[in-house]
Amino acid sequence: MGQQRKNWPTDTKEHLVLAVRGGQLSVAEAARQHGVNESLIHTWKAQFREAGRARVLSRTAPVWGLPASLVTGRGTVKPS
């Protein structure tokens, strides 16, 4: 059986993205120090950027880690 995916806390993702975007850490350094795949940090950066863009354009920012199609206009998850 394969390994179960790790669920990264939002504050950890935010901390890493801000450290990388602020130049305190490179993506490679952040990945190595925290045991995260580099491509995942790039994904988080894109999600962070898109959430900021949505806020600037007066739309509700998507919930971290969920595709925008699963989020309602109020930032909550659509019921199944």
Image: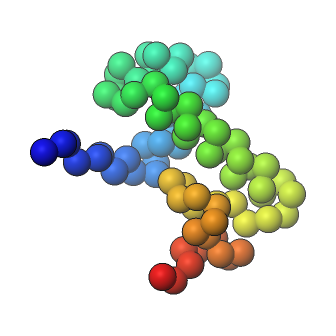
Q: On the rendered structure, is 67 left or right of 12?
A: right
Q: On the rendered structure, is 21 left or right of 43?
A: right
Point 54% across, 74% down: residue: 77
Q: On the rendered structure, is 47 left or right of 32?
A: right
Task: Single out the residue that lies furthest toward the right.
Answer: 57
Q: Position of residue 18 (x, y in %)?
A: 59, 34
Point 56% across, 78% down: residue: 78
Task: For residue 2, say whether it is visible.
Answer: yes
Q: Quadrant of the N terminus?
A: top left
Q: Is residue 18 or residue 71 the one in the foreground?
A: 71
Q: Position of residue 8 (x, y in %)?
A: 37, 47
Task: For residue 17, say whether it is visible.
Answer: no
Point 55% across, 37% down: residue: 43
Quarter of the view holding residue 74? bottom right
Q: Position of residue 24 (x, y in %)?
A: 56, 19
**Total marks placed:** 0
Decide: is 14 above or below 36: below
Task: Single out the residue that lies furthest toward the left.
Answer: 1
Task: Single out the residue that lies furthest toward the front.
Answer: 1
Point 48% across, 82% down: residue: 80
The type of colouring in the image is: rainbow
Decide: is 74 above or below 36: below
Decide: is 8 above or below 78: above
Q: Is residue 74 or residue 16 the one in the foreground?
A: 74
